[in-house]
Amino acid sequence: MFTARILVVDDDEVLRQLVGGVLTIADVTVAEAVDGPDGLAQRPHASRT
């Protein structure tokens, strides 16, 4: 079975939590990042060169 995974990137903590909460209710796995570099670092393949 497929499980959706979404990375929510926003510097506004309230907005990040709101979007993440809605997605979690929709049975989506959510990760959060505070900015672009943090989001890029969380990509599954970020450590590959």
Image (spheres, rainbow, N blue to C red):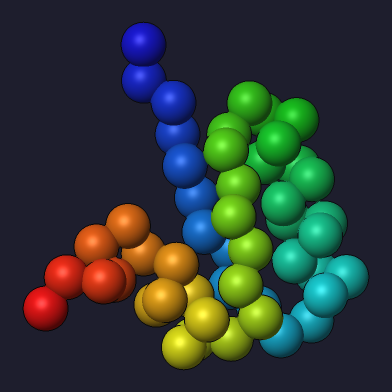
Q: Quadrant of the C terminus?
A: bottom left
Outermost residue, top side: 1
Percent across and percent down for residue 9 are: 58, 73
In the rendered view, tell whether residue 39 sits above or below residue 19: below
In the rendered view, tell whether residue 43 sits above or below residue 49: above
Percent across and percent down for residue 25 are: 75, 30
Outermost residue, left side: 49
In the rendered view, tell whether residue 29 sits above or below residue 12: above
Point 79% across, 81% down: residue: 12
Point 36% across, 20% down: residue: 2
Image quarter of residue 32: bottom right
Image quarter of residue 47: bottom left
Q: How many marks?
A: 0
Point 76% across, 42% down: residue: 22
In the rendered view, tell whether residue 29 sits above or below residue 10: above
- Give the left or right position of residue 31, taking residue 4 as reference: right
Percent across and percent down for residue 42 are: 45, 67
Point 36% across, 11% down: residue: 1
Image quarter of residue 31: bottom right
- Give the left or right position of residue 18, taking residue 9 as reference: right
